[in-house]
Image (cartoon, coloured by chain):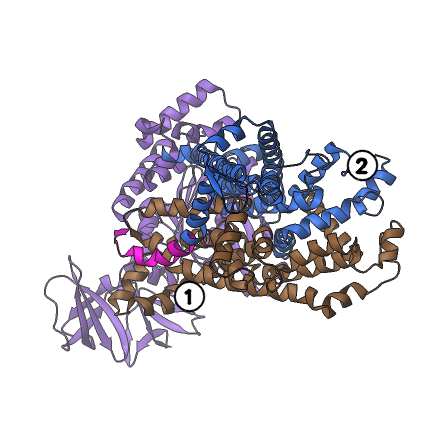
């Protein structure tokens, strides 16, 4: 092993420590947590997890989150695909300005939009629905998806399009049966990023929901403040929120390096 | 400058090679003289790049040793070997100017500034890039970038050897010959030992004084371009060099002579005694002529390639190419083929199996 | 060359519609609020640019803005060099590559309030791993709910924990795209490892580093959830960053006018700074 490997090893250790503590905490009883410090759970308990899997306000939080995140990922990628194609292939009036304007929305602080979103989605009658959160997250996910896909599409030579037209393909058939497979890793990466940013965002998700579509993250904060300091329960809920992310990363692990460069390397 | 000796060199990319098939490079013994221009020629995957990387020190061979002027350098890292290498695509330092690029190898070796400036100027003049010295290297065209990479190899006057790894791959065809003749000219001016790796026979034959032809990790022949053309030591060399390549015709050996069917073919000289394997007759299309008597064949195709015609005739079910000056027979016509005896050789399991006769000079 | 084709607008229409719905209508609401005063009951009065003037002269805004710039400056100064160093030290191929990439990406996929809660649990003085270690093993007096400096250090370490991987992964993507021939040429040219970094690796990483710095700048400037959950902006106002202050005013006190004016100024600063960064960092490419 090389000497410099120590740097990534130390870094990964640093990354894992707080996660370890969260997981360890989730297996401790409330009594053990409050009675003092212990590096490992002294008496293992699954009570915290049992509460989450039996109490609908808890497990529905997960289901709600997964519903709106999936919905958002699908909307963002589907809508971004043709737009990214247009940006990567055509010059059109106002195209550059439009691209930049899209990106500015990625820069907008979510806090700025919290209140107006609340009023907007209440006005159109979508408040407290999964669709409201999914649509709201489009604000920052669509620009990102367009950006990533445009990067990948620009890497595909234009000759591919031309050859397909010469061979008599119609545009939709070309797009679906030739072009999409050619940028499939880009679609995967874009979907990954949409999933990631929708999954981790809370401020808008919390603002736009009350009961029916309340995300898990919001359930956690409310529990933390209302039901006293149930640290074990909180830790268990937190641990469970790491799992979907971990699964998704596992699937894109081979594209991760290229994906994070947004197809531009 | 130095003489290069490769002694019993072998290399495998596997930690425990089981047999010859695991070796990317099978045993090689070679001597290259100081100041010569050499080419390593072979198809991709023949081991020529492996050999190049062993000489430059990027790969340590599994067995054997490399000597520069009788000094063993097998274990030395590239920086301590005093060599230069030009890669397949131009490697330049984007953020530096052309001047800084050329000066880089000198500055790293703490050469005094005046000497650096003088040397860079000299090389820039040779390469005809003097007017670009202050431009950022990133803005150059590919052929100029490749010139700069070559320049970085030539700028040090203490290098043992300059190596070129298919340096013209990314260059536009109409600029290739220009860079190729530039390179030849540079070699004549600096007299450094140069090794040129390529799969293109034209590049190898025009550049090198001596060409090493490789196939599947083996050196099949070492010789001057003329030798490789005139008397290929292996059917592979005959086939790989020349356009079209040498005709290779399966034959039978009886009574010390070679037979195509029932016809005995006159060879350049005596057949060696151990020609018991898979035997073939090799003759270049240049030395096959159409005659009134001789082997009867049917013309399958005639291709006009400009200066002459290439006649493709079927001798039974064996294809024979002949280069014909002047009028060519029509397709389907029956012709008689005549092989020039001094250029007709027998190959046994691929390797040449006739003694050079008196007729072969 | 791209073809000129105005029908491209049909392709971008769905994106345009969705983003405009999400961006333009709320933005108009914000602009509308920012020039009015309300006393509730949906009664609004024209206020002109008063809110903007008041805000730009208010100490509270200056302080929050100052803290925001300090925070962003510190985390950029730590995360960018650290990320590059880690990326340089990572293996280029083999079994450990995916392992490294997956574990490093993990913190980024944890919901932001869970990140805050996790660090809260981690730093509790007597029962958190870090808190216990600081107070009992090292004998320091570490309590971020009381000590502003401890709170600052904690949110910075948390952000480094959360986001350095983004810089690592981007830099790594830049590094693995460098062909081996460059390193071989550098070896042959006798370049030192510093020269290799300065003349080969850094120039090749420039583009991805630009993306990394831009993303880190935007996201750290807009950060809300993690410090809010961790410190709630305290102790006192010591860690009240811009967005925490904004949400306090907008959703806490329902001062819609000032909040809206603040939103616009906030957004304008983010845009301006991002644009500045971008032009500065890509300036050399034009030449």
Tell me the residue at 39%/73% (across/down): B279
Crowding at mark 2 (Cα within 10 Å: few <14, some 14-19, many 20+): many
Q: Nearer the viewer, residue B182 or A105?
A: A105
Q: Nearer the viewer, residue A84 or B151?
A: A84
Q: What colour has chain B?
A: purple
Residue A241 covered by magenta stretch: no
Residue C76 falls in which quadrant of the image? top right
**B225 up-or-down from A162: above or below:** above
Residue C14 covered by magenta stretch: yes
Tell me the residue at 85%/59% (across/down): A29
- Which residue lies under the disc numbered 1? A181
Give the residues in magenta. Answer: C1-19
> Which chain shows up in brown?
A
* Residue A118 appears left or right of B204: right
Residue A232 falls in which quadrant of the image? bottom right
Residue A219 falls in which quadrant of the image? bottom right
Residue C265's spot in the image, x, y percent?
A: 49, 35
Residue A49's spot in the image, x, y percent?
A: 76, 65
Considering the image in quadrants, where does the C terminus of chain C appear? top left
**Any part of residue A255 in sight:** no
Label 1 secondary element: helix
* Count of residue discs: 2
Label 2 secondary element: loop
> Which chain shows up in blue?
C
Give the main secondary structure, helix, strand or loop, of the magenta stretch: helix
- Which residue lies under the disc numbered 2? C142
Residue B244's spot in the image, x, y percent?
A: 27, 62
Q: Nearer the viewer, residue C79 or C159?
A: C159
Residue A55's spot in the image, x, y percent?
A: 73, 68
- The outermost residue toward the left is B327
Q: Chain of mark 1?
A: A
């Amino acid at each position: 092993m090389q000497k410099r490997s120590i740097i990534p090893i130390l870094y990964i250790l640093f990354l894992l420590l707080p996660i370890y503590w969260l997981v360890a905490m989730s297996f401790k009883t409330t009594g053990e947590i409050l009675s003092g410090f212990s590096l490992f759970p002294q008496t293992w308990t699954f009570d915290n997890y049992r509460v989450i899997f039996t109490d609908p306000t808890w497990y529905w939080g997960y289901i709600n989150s997964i519903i709106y995140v999936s919905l958002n990922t699908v909307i963002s990628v589907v809508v971004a695909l043709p737009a990214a194609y247009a940006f990567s292939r055509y010059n059109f009036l106002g195209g550059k300005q439009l691209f930049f304007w899209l990106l500015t929305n990625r820069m907008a602080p979510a806090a700025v939009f919290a209140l107006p979103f609340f009023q907007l989605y209440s006005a159109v009658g979508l408040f407290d629905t999964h669709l409201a959160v999914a649509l709201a997250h489009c604000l920052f996910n669509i620009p990102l998806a367009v950006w990533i896909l445009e990067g990948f599409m620009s890497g595909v030579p234009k000759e591919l399009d031309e050859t397909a037209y010469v061979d008599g393909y119609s545009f939709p058939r070309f797009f679906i049966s030739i072009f999409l497979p050619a940028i499939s890793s880009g679609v995967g990466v874009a979907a990954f990023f949409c999933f990631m940013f929708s999954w981790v965002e809370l401020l808008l998700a919390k603002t736009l929901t009350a009961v029916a579509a309340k995300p898990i993250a919001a359930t956690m904060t409310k529990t933390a403040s209302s039901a006293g300091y149930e640290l074990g329960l909180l830790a268990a809920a937190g641990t469970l929120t790491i799992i979907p992310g971990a699964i998704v990363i596992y699937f894109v692990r081979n594209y991760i390096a290229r994906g994070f460069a947004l197809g531009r390397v | 400058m130095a003489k290069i000796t490769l002694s019993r060199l072998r290399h495998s990319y596997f930690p425990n090679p089981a047999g010859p098939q695991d070796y990317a490079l099978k045993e090689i013994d070679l001597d290259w003289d100081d100041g010569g221009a050499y080419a390593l020629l072979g198809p991709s995957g023949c081991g020529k790049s492996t050999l190049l990387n062993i000489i430059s020190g990027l790969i340590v061979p599994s067995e054997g040793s490399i000597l520069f002027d009788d000094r063993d350098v097998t274990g030395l890292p590239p920086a301590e070997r005093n060599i230069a290498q030009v890669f397949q695509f131009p490697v330049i330092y984007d953020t530096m100017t052309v001047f800084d690029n050329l000066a880089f190898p000198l500055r790293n070796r703490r050469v005094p500034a005046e000497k650096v400036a003088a040397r860079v100027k000299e090389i820039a003049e040779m390469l005809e890039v003097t007017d670009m010295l202050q431009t950022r290297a990133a803005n150059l065209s590919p052929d100029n970038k490749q010139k700069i990479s070559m320049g970085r190899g030539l700028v040090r006057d203490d290098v043992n050897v300059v190596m070129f790894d298919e340096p013209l791959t990314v260059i536009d065809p109409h600029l290739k010959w220009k860079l190729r003749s530039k390179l030849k000219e540079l070699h004549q001016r600096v007299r450094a030992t140069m090794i040129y790796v390529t799969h293109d026979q034209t590049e190898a034959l025009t550049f090198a004084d001596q060409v090493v032809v490789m196939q599947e990790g083996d050196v099949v022949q070492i010789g001057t371009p003329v030798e490789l053309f005139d008397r290929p030591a292996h059917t592979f060399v005959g086939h790989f060099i020349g356009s079209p390549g040498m005709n290779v015709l399966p034959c039978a050996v009886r009574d010390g002579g070679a037979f195509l069917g029932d016809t005995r073919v006159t060879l350049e000289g005596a057949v060696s005694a151990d020609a018991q394997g898979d035997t073939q007759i090799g003759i270049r299309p240049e030395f096959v002529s159409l005659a009134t008597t001789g082997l009867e064949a049917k013309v399958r195709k005639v291709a006009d390639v400009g200066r002459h015609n290439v006649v493709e005739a079927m001798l039974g079910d064996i294809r024979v190419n002949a280069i014909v000056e002047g009028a060519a027979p029509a397709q389907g016509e029956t012709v008689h083929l005549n092989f020039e005896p001094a250029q007709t050789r027998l190959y046994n399991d691929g390797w040449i199996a006739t003694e050079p006769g008196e007729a072969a000079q | 060359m791209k073809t000129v084709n105005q029908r491209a607008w049909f392709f971008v229409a769905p994106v345009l519609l969705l983003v405009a719905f999400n961006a333009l209508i709320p933005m108009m609401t914000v602009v509308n609020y920012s020039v009015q005063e309300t006393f509730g009951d949906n009664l609004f009065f024209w206020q002109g640019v008063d809110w903007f003037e008041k805000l730009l002269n208010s100490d509270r805004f200056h302080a929050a803005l100052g803290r925001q710039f300090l925070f962003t400056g510190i985390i950029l100064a730590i995360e960018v060099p650290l990320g590059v160093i880690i990326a340089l030290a990572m293996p280029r191929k083999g079994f450990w590559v995916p392992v490294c990439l997956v574990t490093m990406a993990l913190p980024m996929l944890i919901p932001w309030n869970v990140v805050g809660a996790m660090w809260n649990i981690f730093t509790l003085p007597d029962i958190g791993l870090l808190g216990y270690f600081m107070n009992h093993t090292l004998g320091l007096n570490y309590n971020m709910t009381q000590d502003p400096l401890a709170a600052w250090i904690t949110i910075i370490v948390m952000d480094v924990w959360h986001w350095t991987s983004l810089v690592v992964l981007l830099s790594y993507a830049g590094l693995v795209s460098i062909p081996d021939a460059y390193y071989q040429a550098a070896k042959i040219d006798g370049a030192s490892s510093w020269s290799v970094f300065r003349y080969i690796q850094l120039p090749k990483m420039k583009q991805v580093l630009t993306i990394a710095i831009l993303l880190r700048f935007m996201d750290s400037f807009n950060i809300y959830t993690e410090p809010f959950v961790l410190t709630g902006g305290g102790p006192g106002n010591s860690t009240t960053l811009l967005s925490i202050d904004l949400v306090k005013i907008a959703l806490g006190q329902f001062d819609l006018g000032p909040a809206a004016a603040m939103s616009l100024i906030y957004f304008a600063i983010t845009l301006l700074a991002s644009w500045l960064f971008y032009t500065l960092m890509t300036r050399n490419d034009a030449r």
